[in-house]
Amino acid sequence: MDAGPVDPTTTSAWAALAAHRAGTTPDLRGWFAADPQRAQRLTFDAADLHVDLSKNLVTDETVRLLLQLAEETGVLARRDAMFAGEHINVTEDRAVLHTALRRPAGAQPPLVVDGQDVDADVQRELEKFLGFAEQVRSGAWTGVTGKRITTVVNIGIGGSDLGPVMAYEALQPYVQQGLRCRFVSNIDPTDVASTTADLDPETTLFIVASKTFGTLETLTNARLARTWLWERLAAAGALADDDEARRGAVAKHFVAVSTALEKVEAFGIDPANAFGFWDWVGGRYSVDSAIGTSLAVAIGAERFREFLAGFHAVDEHFRTAEPERNVPLLMGLLNVYYVDHCDAHTHAVLPYSQLLHRFPAYLQQLTMESNGKSVRYDGSPVTTGTGEVFWGEPGTNGQHAFYQLIHQGTRLVPADFLAFANPAHPLRDGDTDVHALFLANFFAQTKALAFGKTAEEVRAEGTAEEVVPARVFSGDRPTTSIVAPDLTPSVLGQLIALYEHVTFVQGAVWGIDSFDQWGVELGKKLAVEIAPALTGDTAALEAQDPSTAALIRYYLERRR
């Protein structure tokens, strides 16, 4: 695609941004007072998302320089290369085609990458797992005793868990009555034990999500779930004590999301009930692939297609919108500015929607696994800060927890506030519209963070002088407000795609490969080497460093 990443610190825009930052004192009160059109000029629409960037610490000059930085670092050229299927995942020599997962059937021109008709592959697999989902929903797919499935348990980890559970929680109003999903990810045996404790084995279906069908945590939990199924069915008198009966039970109560068909079959799952995806989609970008099978069962094929259409709408916005109005581009550039020119280390995502309570956790993997890198894609060290820590909780819970630090602490914490005009449950407390009360907090928090409260305003309230400093709010705390009419499957897809592309923009400026994740490998490898020491292998124990060996001995002495 190119000769290598551009060092952003060598660009004229970078130097100009540094000088601009040093010479600019943030003053949101003053900027809004002097410019009545500021809010209008810095508010943009991407599909159904209404995005207000006006409370960020930027002037028109800041935005101009950030767009110049994008041009000088080749962000848009790299974007176009991604959509075209070039191998921008350099360390793994792969295309990056999560956007292909949501291209509509018949999209033109066809997407052919490395001689493969990607569109045809995607549509074939989509039809397969959506067809399966409809079988479960209709009751056509039954358990081994002929009872319809009422509980789906997704077994996965990382992107095979975080995306499905987040989307399932977010789209609760769309889940078919009488169906529920549960999720097992942690290898802590408490997870699988507590998740299955109250389930009926005759009406439970397990989805084992592992591309290679070799992920340690996922396969361990899958085996535990299989044993649970056999034991519970046998206890209920629904399973004979022979291998053929056990295989038959697994075939009716387990399906897989995997491309390792031999391993799937060896586990006991019919390969015909394995739904695949491709090496050009990373786990954290895969909720709109067969990894989302549990979600498809919950909300149905039609709603799942709406989910995909939402992704695609923002993909098209990112691909075609002019830079000055390109929301993912602008948000990604703002994040670079805060990290590298304003010394911000974290970024809060604060959904004013209880249904999105898992969205910050989802973004943690998306952003930090993608951009937590210290070398660029040509192997050279980065020359800038990369990868802020993403975190957050739903409002108003967060207001009574950590907002104190955001308002009055010494750390700059850029924050994204998310809200929806219409609630899933329009309840009233007497004459009070509770959702309106809820969103009053949303609007108040961004206003308070932007404009603060001066000492004079505090004194005017009659506050004792010795308490005045503690009650001053400095303001000039940056926020982005993202509002949509409703939290629909389409809008959820739009939100996910927005942050995918924000993450892409940051990585492109920094010159890193946002699509590998080698940082997760070392700990997994060492765990395999250490495990024998926990079961009596003295040589494995003696091979450890003094600290690790001492901790293992402490564990062994106390394990009952």
Image (cartoon, grey):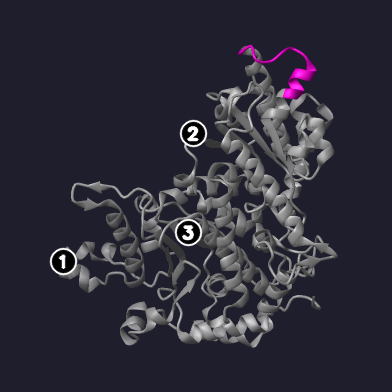
| Residue count near mark 1 (Cα–Cα under 10 Å), binned few <14, some 14–19, many ≥20 | few
Does the stretch in magenta take in 184? no
Please give the residue where the numbered disc 1 appears in the rendered image: 461
Please give the residue where the numbered disc 2 appears in the rendered image: 178
Where residue 402 is drawn, which disc sits there?
none
| Amino acid type, callout 2 | Gly
Task: State yes or no: discs 3 and 1 in contact (Cβ < 8 Å).
Answer: no
Q: Nearer the viewer, residue 505 or 114?
A: 114
Please give the residue where the numbered disc 3 appears in the rendered image: 349
Q: Residue lying farthest left? A: 462
Name the quadrant of the C terminus: top right
Which residue: 77% across, 14% down? 242
Q: Nearer the viewer, residue 32 or 22?
A: 32
3D distance between C-alphas at marks 1 and 2:
55 Å
Q: Disc count in the image?
A: 3
| Residue count near mark 2 (Cα–Cα under 10 Å), binned few <14, some 14–19, many ≥20 | few
Q: Nearer the viewer, residue 552 or 127?
A: 127
| Amino acid type, callout 3 | Val
Q: Which residues are magenta?
A: 236-248
Q: Pinpoint residue 323: horizontal percent, then vertical percent.
A: 57, 81
3D distance between C-alphas at marks 3 and 1:
32 Å
Which residue: 66% across, 68% down? 507
Q: Is residue 390 left or right of residue 460?
A: right
Decide: is 135 above or below 477.
Answer: above
Label 1 SS: loop
Which circle's residue, 3 or 1, is located before the other in the chain? 3
Name the quadrant of the N terminus: bottom right
Instruction: Locate residue 444: give its quadrant.
Output: bottom left
Label 3 SS: strand
